[in-house]
């Protein structure tokens, strides 16, 4: 059991520098465990996790929240963490029906979510605050973050659920007036999932993906990171293969039958009219072929189960079915819905992403030539040791965004890679007793969210994991 560490810090008013009493400091972005600040804004968080959580989420009445990075995955904890909060913003409006009558009890939420695509170690920035409309249909949302772009989300049983991007100038306003938000009767989108013989497929995941047609009515656009939270719904089919989505607002959507662990999806477009009419008008059949399966277990050299992710990829480029799935606790797996042919199975043990020293680490593995329909396939993974190192420039300083790749030889298509931390360090878990060639490559930002490789590289050949920390020096 991870006993954690003691994280200390202070939460301050960004304008005055004074401590904020009673602020909530949560572990990770989900804030599953929380502590409160003292009268001077100080806090002591005992048992903060050493693995899996690298940031804190902080909230206080009257202020917008903050998500702050505590450390890099392999980095040390700070002696003291300082968090500065900006005063919160507000938004208000009124929920009405198509006749202009107020609607009480509607859920009204303001959501924001942004990710720094150029810095994978940066804290995710998010905000989600909710309220209910009053008897007069009015709502007010407070303590919104002033540094993020929000979207409004409104739902109530019997009405189409809608989302709207806030006005583009919301960051310039202390209180955003959203006016009247009209809810109209929603549609019922329903159908079945069946196999190629027309037999119902129970317990199958079905998604409805899309938006209300007027989501940009205020002139803004919903950011890419927030899209999936507001545009996707999911359910499972019943024992007769049936599914249904209620309260669907006017707009264009896609219905997707998603086979768990597989990349294959049955997809059908659906259009909902302003009068809740549907196109196509009848219940929809989504057809998912049953196909063949590959089943087996992932084990170590002693035959003990290893929990891992398994990728199943066709050897023939003309075969289009593939799968990505996680093993059960006993190491077993089943990939279904595969077309006839041979597949390569790549194994990624979960221990590769653990920094706990007492965890038994295992290396990646790959097996080719496995035919669809095979059962009792045994995938054996070797013990892994840590190869730790640091990438620096000619002056011995960190070199920015650098990827380090380990290959058994130049022709190895299944390389192991890691992105260095801001101080230039990296850890790769590699098979014990096997020599690898390392290559470090510097990446630069070509545009927001797009990194490209440069010609600045450094190489080391024939290295073994488990030894002293290595240094790769860039030209």
Image (cartoon, grey):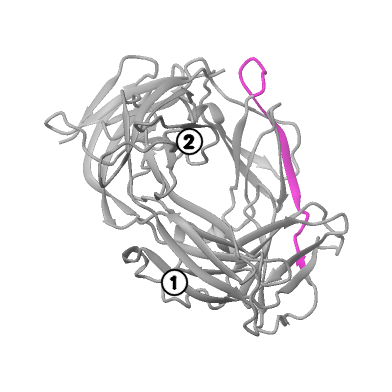
Give the residue at mark 1.
Answer: 177
Above or below, 46 against 446 in this view is above
Residue in front for this viewpoint, 459 or 134? 134
Q: Where does the magenta region start and end?
A: 285-305
What residue lies at 70% left-to-right and 77% top-to-bottom? Answer: 185
In the picture, the quarter occupied by the N terminus is top right
198 relative to 154 in the view: left or right = right
Farthest-out residue, left: 395
User: On screen, 221 above or below 395?
Assistant: below
* Residue 276 picture location, percent across and down: 71, 80
- The answer to whether the residues at label 2 and label 1 have Cβ atoms under 8 Å apart is no
Q: Nearer the viewer, mark 2 or mark 1?
A: 1
Front-most of residues 281 and 125: 125
Crowd tier of the residue under label 2, counting other residues whose Cα lies within 10 Å: few below 14, some 14–19, many 20 or above: many
Q: Residue at label 2?
A: 26
Q: Position of residue 35 (x, y in %)?
A: 48, 30
Q: Residue 434, how many percent across, how many down?
A: 43, 20
- Is residue 297 in the magenta section? yes
Q: Secondary structure at mark 2?
A: strand
Measured Cα–Cα span from mark 2 to mark 1: 31 Å
Residue pictured at 42% horizontal, 32% vertical: 37
């Amino acid at each position: 059991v991870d006993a954690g560490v003691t994280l200390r810090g202070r939460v301050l008013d960004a304008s005055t520098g004074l401590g904020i009493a009673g602020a909530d400091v949560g572990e990770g972005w989900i804030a599953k465990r929380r502590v409160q600040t003292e009268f001077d804004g100080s806090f002591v968080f005992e048992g903060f996790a050493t693995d899996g959580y690298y940031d804190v989420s902080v909230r206080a009445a009257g202020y917008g929240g903050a998500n702050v990075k505590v450390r890099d995955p392999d980095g040390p904890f700070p002696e003291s963490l300082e968090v500065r909060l900006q005063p919160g913003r507000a938004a208000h409006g009124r929920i009405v029906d198509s006749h202009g009558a107020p609607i009480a009890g509607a859920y009204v939420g303001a959501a924001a979510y942004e990710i720094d695509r150029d810095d994978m170690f940066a804290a995710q920035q998010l905000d989600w605050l909710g309220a209910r409309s009053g008897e007069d249909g009015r709502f007010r949302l407070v303590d919104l973050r002033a540094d993020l772009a929000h979207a409004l989300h409104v739902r109530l049983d019997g009405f189409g659920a809608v989302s709207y991007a806030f006005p583009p100038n919301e960051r310039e306003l202390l209180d955003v007036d959203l006016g009247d938000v009209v809810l109209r009767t929603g549609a019922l989108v329903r159908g079945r999932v069946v196999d190629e013989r027309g037999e119902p497929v129970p317990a199958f995941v079905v998604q409805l993906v899309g938006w209300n047609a007027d989501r940009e009515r205020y002139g803004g656009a919903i950011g890419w990171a927030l899209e999936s939270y507001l545009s996707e719904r999911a359910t499972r089919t019943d024992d007769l293969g049936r599914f249904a989505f209620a309260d669907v607002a006017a707009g264009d959507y896609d219905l997707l039958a998603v086979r768990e662990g597989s990349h294959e999806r049955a997809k059908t477009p659906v259009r909902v009219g302003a009068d809740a009419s549907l196109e196509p008008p009848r219940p929809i059949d989504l057809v998912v072929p049953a196909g063949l399966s590959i089943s087996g277990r992932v084990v170590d050299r002693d035959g003990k189960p290893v929990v891992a992710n398994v990728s199943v990829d066709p050897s023939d480029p003309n075969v289009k079915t593939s799968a990505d799935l996680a093993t059960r606790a006993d190491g077993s797996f089943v990939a279904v819905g595969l077309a006839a042919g041979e597949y390569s199975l790549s194994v990624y043990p979960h221990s590769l992403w653990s920094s706990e020293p007492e965890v038994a680490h295992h290396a990646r593995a790959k097996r080719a030539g496995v035919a669809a329909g095979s059962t009792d396939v045994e995938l054996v993974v070797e013990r892994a040791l840590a190869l730790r190192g640091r990438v620096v420039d000619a002056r011995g300083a960190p070199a920015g965004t650098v990827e380090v790749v380990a290959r058994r030889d130049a022709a190895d298509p299944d390389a192991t890679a890691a992105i260095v931390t801001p101080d230039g360090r990296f850890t790769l878990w590699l098979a014990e007793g096997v020599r690898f060639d390392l290559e470090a490559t510097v990446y630069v930002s070509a545009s927001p969210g797009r990194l490209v490789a440069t010609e600045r590289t450094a190489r080391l050949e024939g290295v073994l994991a488990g030894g002293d920390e290595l240094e790769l020096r860039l030209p």
